[in-house]
Image (cartoon, helix red, strand yellow):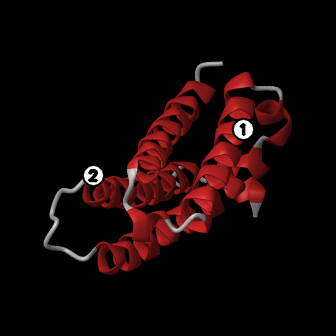
Amino acid sequence: MFTALQVHPWAYPALEVMHIVGIALLVGNLVALELRVFGRAADVPALALARLSLSLAATGFALAAASGLLMFATQPADLLANRAFTLKMLLLFAAACNAAFFHARGSLQRLDRVARWLMVSSTLIWLAVIACGRWIAYQ
């Protein structure tokens, strides 16, 4: 299967498209939720928006993770030696820790300064993940 990804002219580019669509779903929905945490669209209940945004973000993450794992499987040694890839993996871990803390402290119910700081941190981390993902090709 991994050989097919390397030899078929459309396989790897299609996988990259799936990866980008997943990232768009993930980050786009997190930004929408962040705007609500900062008080935009105050007439929209935060918990209702969070249910929708987070389910779409989770779908995007699953799509990006699955396609990313398949891309990794085509050249694991090269990627493990790539500093941008290593940094991307560390940033993904940081994003997971940030999200866990955000939800563990009940930030969606509080919508306080810490919730806003965690949302901004999340967005910045995900933008850094995207930058590292692009940087991988140039290392």
In 3D space, how far apart are the residues under numbered discs 1 and 2 (Cα atoms)?
27 Å
- Mark before the other along the chain sequence, 1 or 2: 2
Quadrant for the C terminus, please: top right
Residue name at image x 57 percent, y 30 percent: 132
| Above or below: residue 46 compared with residue 120 | below
Q: Classify residue 40 as left or right of residue 71.
A: left
Residue name at image x 64 percent, y 63 percent: 66
User: In the rendered image, which residue does mark 2 sit on?
Assistant: 38
Foreground: disc 1 or disc 2: 2
Q: x%, y% of residue 127?
A: 46, 37
Choose top left, top right, bottom left or bottom right for residue 34: bottom left
Secondary structure of the residue carrying tag 2 is loop
**Dot 1, how many residues are within 10 Å of its Cα: few (below 14), some (14-19), or many (20+)?**
few
User: In the rendered image, which residue does mark 1 sit on?
Assistant: 90
The dot on residue 64 is none
Residue name at image x 73 percent, y 47 percent: 72
Q: x%, y% of residue 61?
A: 54, 62
Residue occupying the far top of the picture? 139
Residue name at image x 52 percent, y 31 percent: 134
Secondary structure of the residue carrying tag 1 is helix
Q: Amino acid at mark 2?
A: Phe
Q: Amino acid at mark 1?
A: Leu
**Dot 2, how many residues are within 10 Å of its Cα: few (below 14), some (14-19), or many (20+)?**
some
Quadrant for the N terminus, please: bottom right
Q: Classify residue 127 as left or right of residue 137.
A: left
